[in-house]
Amino acid sequence: MNCAWCDTEIILQLSWANLMMLEKAEILCPECKFDLEWIQGNRCDRCSRNTNEKRCTDCQWWEKQKENGSFLFNYSIFSYNPFMKEVIAKWKYRGDYYLGYIFENYVMEAFREKFSFLKKEGLVVPIPLSEERLLERGFNQAKMIADFLPLETKELLTRLHGEKQSKKSRKERILTGSPFFITETINKPVLLVDDIYTTGTTLRHAARLLMEHGCPSVYALTLVRG
Ligand SMILES: [Zn+2]
Ligand SMILES: [Zn+2]
């Protein structure tokens, strides 16, 4: 098999994990894999940002706002380094669906380590794209990540089309109202899934809406911490 990114042939390393089919075969060569940068060291226990404090200044500020309901914590797996930026751009904006499988093992491992307590009754809810955006991109990258997880995935949220979030400034993004809608009530804990955590505003809007509709607790798993 060849590397999904650079097309170099991958020499299969046999291990118990892949013989027992516990892990999916790697689709990145060792060199490309080396370019993936895990978030390491101390991180904010609320948002996964690298910091030596227990809680980063952003999260401390949000706590002082005394908002009703948000996610309890977000766990992100990778840093948004130049390699990741390229991979995400090709996967998400240029529609290369297959590249998403690069993340499958890492997403499953993060779930096992941080969220296995949800296994009994939790639901996975991917952050949705608007209909227009979905047509443009062909697939929802958050849904792809959600489907890697060993919980039921429910697309409970819908999203109204707005200006491209990425074109807005940070301040604008924080101030904009929620783009989400929900039509059901829900009585199970939810793990929200998205590709990138930047300001956390998207997740906060989604979490608040879920809680207003009966959800007892909301957590978030994101691939990348921007
Ligand atoms: Zn490669
Ligand atoms: Zn934080």
Image: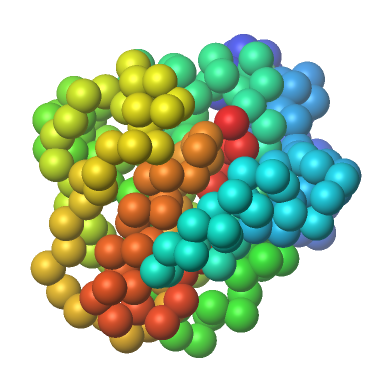
Q: Is residue 161 left or right of residue 16?
A: left
The residue located at (55%, 15%) in the rendering is 86
Q: Is residue 47 above or below residue 208?
A: above
Q: Residue at x 54, y 53 (%)?
A: 62
Residue 154 shown left or right of residue 160 in the figure:
right
- 221 or 49: nearer the eye? 49
| Residue 117 coordinates in the image, percent (x, y) | 61, 80
Tell me: 80 left or right of 138. right
Q: Quadrant of residue 185?
A: bottom left
Q: Position of residue 40 (x, y in %)?
A: 83, 42
Q: Is residue 124 visible?
A: no
Task: Please say if 56 is above or below 7.
Answer: below
Q: Residue at x 56, y 42 (%)?
A: 223
Residue 169 x %, y %: 40, 20
Q: Residue at x 63, y 27 (%)?
A: 80
Q: Nearer the viewer, residue 132 or 19?
A: 132
